[in-house]
């Protein structure tokens, strides 16, 4: 459960993780971004994290395709590089959750679809009753978790403020409408697990959505 | 058709099998667990089996990610390790079926969905008429097999008792609602084959379920 | 466009082809079988072909997992081996089509589903209008091809007779109900291409089938 | 952002790109074709591009499976080779868009289905509101882009004229009915990104199409 990585170690982990997510088609068209916090031994050291640079094929990242970022989205390395606009969403999570070591944003079909068509009136997607929910950090499947669904906005300052206002306690994630899911973890492995679990839940919901078009399906099953 | 493995041999098989199942997205978010019985040359040797430890990425298991377990879920190695709660379900199968050498539990989307929405009034899912059924150990496709669907329960002692009570003769498997399928085989290869066949049957049923929403689909086909 | 292979060359091709089909989930649970004809320089040499033995994991075949078969399904090598019952279907194709060098049978979900739910009254599945059809050996997409769908039968002699009676001229394939598709080609590469094209057409038909459940879908599209 | 490649470099990129697209099942049955422009240092050098030869397995291309083509579809190398009929569509794009360095045509299920069933009365498919749209070269998701859908035709001269007549400004792509999508980019990486984004949009539209069969689905979701 290591939470302390050099930038080079973080890049290695993110290269491998992005390759895996890309293979699952969760980072198509250079979409999404992944980051790992770089912790310091000094007290009160300012926030630093390594994040994927924009516009690179997530299936074939190299050590040059990352940016080291500090507070306010300031690029620390490489000199002269520009950080992604979405960097501010990663910063918002790291500032709120001191224990978060990795923030992963992927852009899956099911998340995109549900965020546009299946958001409940309270502005959330609710999941319950499935064993898989336990992998998000709950002790039982007998719980209803609410994932905030937030209107997409190209103004990242307004968007990150809205995200912080809307996060649900104990729920490691939010979804941007038409855009994709953000999640995080105390370790990179935990963040990866959360990505997989959210996507499982999204695909499950898609199945339920598709079959919900006719409530008589339940009656028909036994006649097939 | 080997059925006798050292713990190291069993770990090698399970690492490879888990990697394959993970690649198919059947063990997302560290879900599922796989075990192989460790047979002894001694008469009346007590039950021992090697099982995946909880919480590890099933796509990247190493030899350290297993636990050797004896009767009552007791961890024999490594010293001080704690076994997964679901170990008792593996034990129940090994005690009931002396010929079972491997017990595999995966957590697929289709299994999860069907277990929540398509269980028949008798508490089973029934499959028939498909050639693929023969791979579960039947001589013909002209048979109806019933897969027990059992209410999920975080109390593993109660759950394993219920499982034993509900197993169907000749049917190598059961499904936990909202959770996934368990199956087994006389060899690891047979257990793997059973996993693949159950999942094929589940996906087939999902197709039938989705299209069953309108009984006129049969009539419409010829007009497409 | 080689059509002449030694048994060892044929095994290499089939190992690689089966691994690819398995990765696509078209040979789950050890299902399906693949063969390549072994041509001889002698005039009027009797039929010989190398075929996958039953019961082996198609994702991990080895050179030992094949049988050399002659007329009447007789096993020529290895001595004492028993050929698969379905060998007679391969023989029927080789006898009818002298130019066929490979016969491939895979067991896909879409083929299985369509064979059980979407067969037209004439006992065929019809495909038309798609560019992909040209890959089956037609010069244009403006053609309707009919794939025979044949009742499954565990008696392989009766089944192979029925297959020969039902084959459509110029259409390289037939489907067994609840079982899967057979196709062939003048070269192994052509047989592989035919498998891929049939499966593309099957998946296309599945999409049409799912959306056909409500004829108003056409009207609704523009309001989405 | 390199745009200048030797034929050997172009072949290496296309081999790798085709392997990736094939793995995603976007070039089944030897379908589709990919090309890269070969730029010259000379002023007013005539058009040259390297394109995949017809009929080869796109998952296993070798350096011999390409043709160097000049204006009017003339094969420059290898001597005596015949270019694919669809070469003229690549030429039309290269002539119209001087900045285009790669033209990619893939043949996906979703594109094929939508082109046959979901074309809007104006002869286009419209996409809007999704963040992914930005990857096609737009600054915001708040835009509606129109992808021309063009009747398939085995006469490639007529077809390429129709394509040029129908292209939409700023939209890097068109779809042939029953056939698949063409797209391009200033670099091979950009063309690959466009392929992935079109396919994401197509799959999203398929989801919407399937669930649109019943407008009450929105109401039902909250009762699931």
Image (tube, coloured by chain):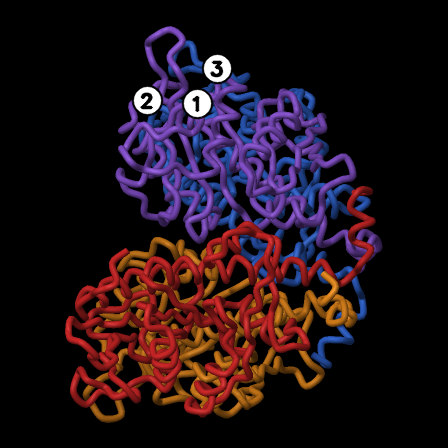
Chain colours: A blue, B orange, C red, D purple
Which quarter of the rendering shows the C terminus of chain C?
Answer: top right
Q: Are marks 2 and 3 in contact (CB under 8 Å)?
A: no
Q: Nearer the viewer, residue D103 or C169?
A: C169
Q: SS class of the residue under badge 3?
A: loop
Q: Is residue C162 above or below residue A13?
A: below
The residue labelled by disc 3 is A82
In the figure, residue A2 lies in which quadrant?
A: top left
Is there one chain holding both mark 1 and mark 3?
Answer: no
B190 sits to left or right of A171:
left
Q: Earlier in the sequence, mark 1 or mark 2?
A: 2
Q: Is residue C26 above or below residue C67?
A: above
In the drawing, what numbered circle is on residue B219?
A: none
Alpha carbon separation for disc pair 2 and 3:
28 Å
In the drawing, what numbered circle is on residue D5?
A: 2
Query: For the residue carrying disc 2, how many other residues have a C-alpha within 10 Å: few (<14), some (14-19), or many (20+)?
Result: some
C196 sits to left or right of A121:
left
Q: Are marks 1 and 3 in contact (CB under 8 Å)?
A: no
Is residue B65 in view?
Answer: yes
Q: Nearer the viewer, residue B79 or B96?
A: B96
Q: Are marks 1 and 2 in contact (CB under 8 Å)?
A: yes
In the figure, residue C65 lies in which quadrant?
A: bottom left
Q: Nearer the viewer, mark 2 or mark 3?
A: 2
Is there one chain holding both mark 2 and mark 3?
Answer: no
In the drawing, what numbered circle is on residue D101?
A: 1
Is residue D222 in view?
Answer: no
Q: Mark 3 falls within which chain?
A: A
Q: SS class of the residue under badge 2?
A: loop
Residue C118 in the image: state x and y as whole percent: 65, 71
Residue at x-position 28% and y-position 55%: C1
Q: Mark 2 falls within which chain?
A: D
Q: Nearer the viewer, residue C172 or A69?
A: C172
């Amino acid at each position: 459960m290591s939470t302390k990585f050099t930038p080079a170690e973080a890049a290695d982990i993110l290269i491998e993780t992005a390759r895996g997510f890309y293979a699952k088609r969760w980072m198509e068209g250079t979409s999404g971004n992944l980051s790992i916090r770089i912790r310091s031994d000094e007290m009160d050291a300012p926030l630093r994290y390594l994040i994927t640079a924009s516009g690179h094929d997530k299936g074939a990242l190299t050590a040059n395709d990352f940016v080291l970022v500090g507070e306010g989205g300031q690029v620390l390395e490489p000199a002269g590089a520009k950080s992604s606009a979405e960097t501010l969403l990663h910063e918002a999570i790291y500032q709120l959750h001191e224990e978060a070591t990795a923030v992963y944003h992927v852009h899956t079909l099911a998340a995109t679809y549900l965020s546009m068509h299946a958001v409940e009136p309270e502005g959330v997607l609710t999941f319950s009753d499935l064993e898989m929910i336990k992998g998000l950090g709950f002790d039982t499947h007998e719980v209803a978790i609410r994932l905030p669904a937030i209107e997409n906005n190209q103004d990242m300052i307004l968007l990150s403020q809205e995200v912080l206002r809307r996060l649900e306690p104990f729920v490691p994630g939010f979804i941007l409408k038409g855009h994709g899911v953000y999640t995080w973890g105390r370790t990179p492995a935990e963040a990866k697990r959360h990505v997989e679990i959210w996507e499982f839940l999204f695909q499950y919901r898609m199945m339920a959505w598709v079959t919900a078009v006719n409530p008589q399906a339940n009656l028909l099953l036994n006649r097939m």
